[in-house]
Image (tube, rainbow, N blue to C red):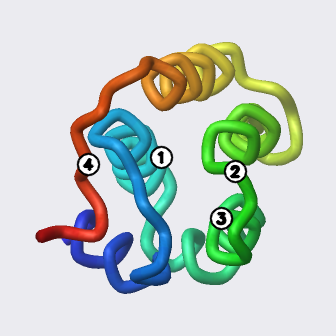
């Protein structure tokens, strides 16, 4: 479900490693497909051709709040997603072959 939603939302011209893809799937599972397509500024930036790692490092940490207040567990989760995305691999996950 989450991978299908994400795959539909990302332009086919975007190339993602398995680690970048994994970080995005984790975010989508935590938030929702609705928030992905309606509210995720990182998706808009990636689809516009901006560097994936730069965008994720800048945008994912912003999603650390519950009812407008910082939530430590979400900050930790966002940091782990950024770390995963930044972990180098040459294995491509998206677009699927």
Residue that carries the numbered disc 2 in the rendered image:
51
> Tags 4 and 3 in contact by the CB under 8 Å rule?
no
Residue that carries the numbered disc 3 in the rendered image:
46
> Tags 4 and 1 in contact by the CB under 8 Å rule?
no
Tag 1: Cα neighbours inside 10 Å, few (<14), some, or many (≥20)? some
Mark 2: which secondary structure? loop
**Comes first in the chain, label 1 or label 3:** 1
Residue that carries the numbered disc 1 in the rendered image:
27
Q: Residue at x 68, y 21 (%)?
A: 75
Q: Residue at x 42, y 21 (%)?
A: 88
- Residue 20, position in %: x, y? 43, 41
Residue 61 seen in this snapshot: yes
Residue 66 seen in this snapshot: no
Q: Give the foreground label among 2 and 3.
A: 2
Q: Give the foreground label among 4 and 3.
A: 4
**Comes first in the chain, label 4 or label 2:** 2
């Amino acid at each position: 479900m989450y991978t299908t939603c994400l795959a539909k939302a990302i332009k086919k011209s975007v190339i993602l490693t398995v680690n970048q893809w994994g970080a995005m799937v984790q975010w989508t599972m935590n938030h929702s497909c609705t928030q992905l397509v309606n509210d995720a500024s990182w998706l808009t930036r990636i689809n516009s051709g901006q560097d994936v790692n730069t965008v994720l490092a800048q945008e994912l940490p912003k999603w650390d709040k519950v009812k407008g207040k910082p939530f430590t567990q979400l900050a930790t989760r966002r940091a782990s997603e950024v770390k995963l995305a930044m972990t180098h691999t040459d294995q491509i996950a998206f677009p699927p072959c």
